[in-house]
Image: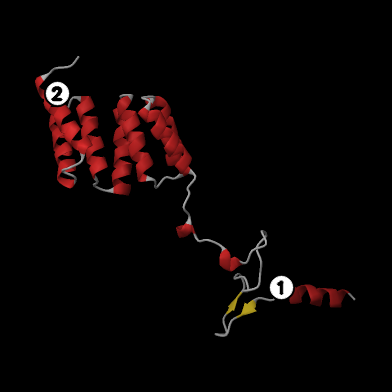
Amino acid sequence: MAGLLLAAVLAGCQSSTLTDGVVRANEPAQAEFTAFGDTFEGLKTISDVEYYASDQAVAEAKNQFRQENYGNAGALFYKAVQLAPNDGEAWLGLAASCDRIRRFDLSDKAYRQAHRLIGTSTAYYNNVGYSYLLRGNLKEARQNFLKAYELAPNDPTVANNLALLGSSVTNIGR
């Protein structure tokens, strides 16, 4: 009796054999169902995902940044980069938030990570230029704003920052 029971259990553990003769023990058969009742064929792959865990944190962080709550924005952008370390937009937002609270040591690290992920974009050069403007390094600010301008000559944000740079040269603000 025990032998019959053991044979029945082992028969249930048989792996599927495809027509090429290769035994694949960890691939589900076509008719197998997931724990949710659908077939394995209907499952989405990672590349099909349209929502990421960091999306909500980035949206909230942008809202806080627009309201000039830079510390809160920085905390939310930090949460976003913890949830999705390859989110270049979140790293760029973290860097800009750190700039606004004058934590340039942290913003430099975040800009390096953003550059690694998003490369040389208009937003990157514009933000780095603004960072240098906040630090009072007008030469570096100008170089970065001009790189942003080369990439997007009709971008109003870049044009505004170049105008702001021009007024910074003539007017000393304290």
Q: Position of residue 67 (x, y in %)?
A: 38, 26
Q: Quadrant of residue 68?
A: top left
For marks 1 and 2, give the CA distance. Answer: 75 Å
Q: Amino acid at mark 1?
A: Cys
The N terminus, quarter of image: bottom right
- Specify whether 109 is left or right of 37: left
Q: Which residue is mark 1?
A: 13
- Specify whether 102 is left or right of 145: right
Q: Secondary structure at mark 1?
A: loop
Q: Position of residue 38 (x, y in %)?
A: 64, 63
Q: Amino acid at mark 2?
A: Ser
Residue drawn where x is 18% and y is 46% of the image: 151
Q: Label for residue 168? A: 2
Residue at the farthest left position: 170
Q: Position of residue 64 (x, y in %)?
A: 41, 29
Up-down: is 122 above or below 3? above
Q: Nearer the viewer, mark 1 or mark 2?
A: 2
Q: Secondary structure at mark 2?
A: helix
Q: Tell me if mark 1 has few (under 14), some (14-19) or many (20+) residues whose alpha carbon lies within 10 angstroms of its own.
A: few
Using the image as rendered, state which of residue 5 and residue 55 is in the foreground.
55
Q: Position of residue 137 (x, y in %)?
A: 17, 28
- Specify whether 15 is left or right of 65: right
Q: Quadrant of residue 104?
A: top left
Residue drawn where x is 84% and y is 74% of the image: 5
